[in-house]
Image (tube, rainbow, N blue to C red):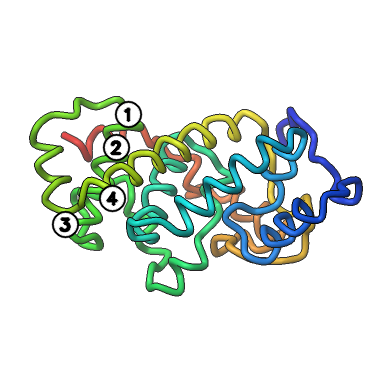
Amino acid sequence: MAKQRISYVDPATISDPAMLAELDRCRREGTPRPESQAVRAHVPAVFWSFANSWREVFHKGVCDHSIKELCRVYVSQSVKCEYCGNQRSEKSKNAGLVEEDYKDLLNFEKSTRFDARQKAALAYAEAIVWDLPAEDALWERLHSQFSEPELVELGYFIALTMGQQRWLRTLNIEHHKVLAGTVASMAPGFESTEALEKSKASSDYWAKQSPRLTDRNAAE
């Protein structure tokens, strides 16, 4: 495994009960899992800035959570953030998202798995992630499916998760390293260290694919 670039803060060294409670929530519920927050814990203001934004904008908010979840993993697959891309929202799972949905994300325009609203949201994510022209046709499509408050929240969320994922992928952090022992929000095949290593060694592991080429083809 590549060398980790920033250490985890050991929860045993944290005295703030609120921070410990949030890390325990990450352990029990995931998205995010504890490792990324254990890195942010080096700076409490960063820890809480992310935790609060993630709670209010991703888990809560005015736009459908599952649409935001699809956009989150679309970003993961596009920027190859393996840490984020190997997590799944339990809330979206309970709402009906299945693993096959995630496998079709980079070819969303041609997929039969997504409805018009989901495809519009993913086109929004595509334009933001890949710096594609945001022309009238895109905005007409978005306004036909979403209110302006929803578009504000969704655009902000895509930008937030894209920035965080582009950062996290440089750190070489991994699951099951901090407060290990739960499978909360782990993608199928990544529930333990052993399962994760086996999945990553597979020739069809998603991060071994070429997202840029696939994404461009889907957009054309």
Q: Residues within 10 Å of mark 1 (few under 14, many from 20)?
A: some
Residue 113 is situated, as x and y percent measured from the top left of the image, at 25, 63
How far apart are the two marked residues, 1 and 2, measured between alpha carbons? 6 Å
Give me the disc on residue 150.
Answer: 4
Q: Amino acid at mark 3?
A: Ala
Q: Is residue 201 left or right of residue 65?
A: right
Q: Residue 169, percent across and down?
A: 58, 33
In the picture of the structure, the residue carrying the numbered disc 1 is 130
Residue 130 lies, with reference to residue 199, above or below; the image says above
Q: How many marks?
A: 4
Q: Does residue 177 lie above or below 169 as drawn?
A: below
State if disc 4 and disc 3 touch (CB < 8 Å): no
Image quadrant holding the N terminus, namely: top right
Real-space Cα distance between discs 2 and 4? 17 Å
Q: Earlier in the sequence, mark 4 or mark 1?
A: 1
**Given the image, on which type of amino acid does mark 1 rest?**
Trp
Residue 198, x across and y down, in percent: 64, 55
Residue at the image position 13 percent from the left and 29 percent from the top: 135
* Residue found at the far right of this picture: 13
CA distance separating discs 3 and 1 = 21 Å
Label 3 sits on residue: 116
Residue 126 shows which numbered tag? 2
Across and down, in percent, residue 185 comes to 58, 62
